[in-house]
Image (tube, rainbow, N blue to C red):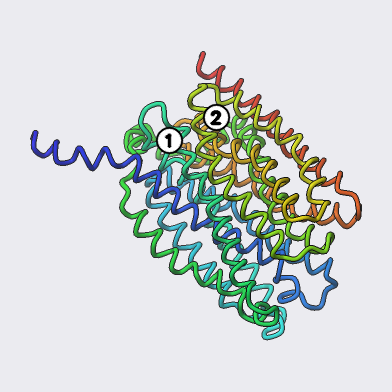
Amino acid sequence: MAPEANATAPRRRSQPARAAIASFVGTTIEWYDFFIYGTAAALVFGPLFFTESTPFVATLAAFGTFAVGFLARPLGGVVFGHFGDRFGRKRALVITLVMMGIATTGIGLLPTYATIGIWAPIALVALRILQGIAVGGEWGGAVLLAAEHAPKGRSTFFASFAQLGSPAGQILSLLAFRLAGLMDKPSFMEWGWRLPFLVSVVLLVVGLAIRLGVEESPEFEDSRAETRRDVAPIREVFATSLKPLALAAGANTFGIGSVYLFNTFMITYTTQYLGLERATILDALLVAAFIQLVMTPVGARIAELIRNERLFLQIALTWAMLAPYPLFLLVDMRATWAITLGLGLNVLGSATFYAVIAGYVAGAFPTRVRYTAISVAYQFCGAIAGGLTPIVGTILAERFQGHWWPIAAFGTTLAAISFLCVTGLGRYRARQAGS
């Protein structure tokens, strides 16, 4: 007995780090796939898939297909939340990774409107829906795989590794389009834009190899005995946890919406309304993504040290409510250094907030329904705050041409919603802990 126990001990000790790395790599691939669609929607999907429209309408149509992916995400959250709460986090995450790889590669191979007419945007929407379902099931499972493997008292920090996938995926997607954009414009528009999508096949193989090497979450294994098999997790969540579910969804508003307002929409704003070169904004966004990548684990560690996640989130959101105004003032200068500085200052609030919100929200729900609860909360919020944000930004930019303050006010509103819901969720958790 003793030799066998000693032989398995190193493997068990390595699981927290391995689970964190697997969550990071998996979410990086998923978000890379999801983000390259947003970049392509801003740069090429309008003229390639909606050629009979005006530039403004084509951009809205491209962002409309972008939004479809968000509308599909709640379905992915419900389906894979159920699967993950019943059969395990790891199994669900393997399926979501394969689904995303298939959908993204399919987009890279898709004929355009000039080749197959109306079937091109229809097929684009169908593949985008598949992407949305996959990423809808990915986030919650990746957060839990890392957090539930974490040593005692370290779940916030370990959960932040899943959050690192967002800036890492953004960096890879921007680099991919930056490199593809080095070719001449006719070649880029004809076939170069496809390369970032086709690279997904290689990333899929790497991600699967890492993810398959992680054991199931120990907290999930321990909760199997208390899991009710006669009630679907989604029904239990709506029956017993409706208030924290609504607060969790609202709390995620800024973390989701800010990405698509200050990244995806910012590409359209600077290229179409300020007349800047595509490379200028992509380079500035790349620097901002690197700042987010660094600040995410730093923010999680600080929150862990001060032992007050709610206060930390409130401070980050206060910064986030103020930051859009200097951001747009600097962007309006149309200088690369000013745009980069503005995005860098702005991302400090979103990065530190995003680092902590996953673990904070997960702590409001019992293990047996946690995958379903946080997935549904995050993805329903994503369907609204993520899918509609670039569209709202485009409408505001068109309606108030020459004035950036309505867009900045919109960013402040997103942060204010999260502030109120983070505060409410903190009070709910305190009452539950005291009961």
Would residue 51 be visible to someone looking at this image? yes
Q: Residue at x 61, y 36 (%)?
A: 353
Question: Image quarter for residue 125?
Answer: bottom right
Q: Position of residue 144 (x, y in %)?
A: 44, 40
261 lies above or below 308: below
Would residue 60 be visible to someone looking at this image? no
Q: Which residue is mark 1?
A: 368
Residue toward you, 322 or 330: 330
- Give the left or right position of residue 249, taking residue 322 as reference: left
The amino acid at mark 2 is Thr
- Give the left or right position of residue 365, taking residue 115 as reference: left
Q: Residue at x 49, y 58 (%)?
A: 29
2 lies above or below 42: above
Disc 2 secondary structure class: helix
Q: Which residue is mark 2?
A: 240
The amino acid at mark 1 is Arg
Residue toward you, 194 or 134: 194
Instruction: Specify few, some or many for label 1: CA neighbours under 10 Å numbering under 14, 14-19, or 20 or more.
Output: many
Name, please, the residue furthest toward the top. 434
Q: Earlier in the sequence, mark 2 or mark 1?
A: 2
Q: Position of residue 191 (x, y in %)?
A: 61, 80
230 lies above or below 274: above
